[in-house]
Amino acid sequence: MNEDDAKDTPKPDAAAEAAAPRPANDDTPIDTAADDPAEKSGWEKGPEADAAMLQAENDELRDRMLRLMAEMENMRRRAEREKEDSRKYAVTTFARDILAVGDNMSRAIQSIDEDARAIADQAVKNLIEGVEMTEREMLNVFERHGIKRIEPEGEKFDPNFHQAMFEAENPDVASGTVIQVVQPGYVIGERVLRPAMVGVSKGGPKAQAAPEPSEAPAQPDDKAQAEAESTAEAQAAAKSHEDAARAKTAGPSGKTVDRNA
């Protein structure tokens, strides 16, 4: 082969040479550092970069754990509130229906005046006492289940608990005062089971209203505030667990050793 033929002959590619089969007796080492993905991906940056990467991953996992713990705490508290409400207000429909029985007992007792009682024989007196005892026992049962009777005579009219049936002129009583209870009301827990039917006065002096502050601070929503508090508590609990875990390290024998000991 002359010099011109050597110039025209193409040189083999480096990748082709690496992929070509090698003779069995060829002991020349192959440089694989350039093709190692680990070397290209950042292992050559040193332990500081690895530590920073692991710390960032640890921070992300810790944030996820705190959020998950806060969410679980909110779900637990919400379930407890729903359970408590179900227990407290489970008898609402039954109690509302049984109120008519109590009203009939009250009407039966009120229909007998003192003069009729005085001239009644012993059997009638015993009957009246039995009806009164039955009414008292029913009210005691209501109290045990969180149902309270409201008779707001003499109190200021409250549309949340009272239902006005009529208005009457009375200059001696402040306007908006309940002067007569036509039918008592009932509440169960913090809810109105039945508003009290009342008569309200008018024409008298105005009732003294409580002074209102000039600038009342905005009150946060109770549900949002409870969830925020539970989130803070869950984060504090997670942080305490993490601090306790960091206070422990593995000793030379492989056993866990407490640094605070």
Image: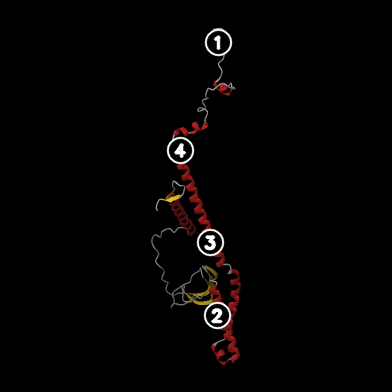
Asked if the residue under mark 4 is in contact with the one under mark 1, i.e. CB atoms within 8 Å, the reply is: no
Residue under label 3: 80
Query: Where in the figure is residue 49, as x and y percent of width and height?
Result: 44, 37
Q: Secondary structure at mark 3?
A: helix
Q: Closer to the N terminus: mark 2 or mark 4?
A: 4
Query: Where in the figure is residue 226, as x and y percent of width and height?
Result: 48, 58
Query: Where in the figure is residue 34, as x and y percent of width and height?
Result: 50, 27
Q: Amino acid at mark 4?
A: Asp
76 and 247: which one is in front? Answer: 247
Residue under label 4: 50
Instruction: Specify whether residue 165 is in view.
Output: no
Residue under label 1: 6
Q: Closer to the N terminus: mark 3 or mark 4?
A: 4
Say above or below: 118 vs 157: below
Residue positioned 55% across, 8% down in the render: 4
Depth check, mark 2 against mark 4: the one in front is 4
Depth check, mark 1 against mark 2: the one in front is 1
Question: How many angstroms separate mark 2 from mark 4 (CA)?
Answer: 78 Å
Disc tally is: 4
**Residue 136 bears which disc, if any?**
2
Say above or below: 74 vs 207: above
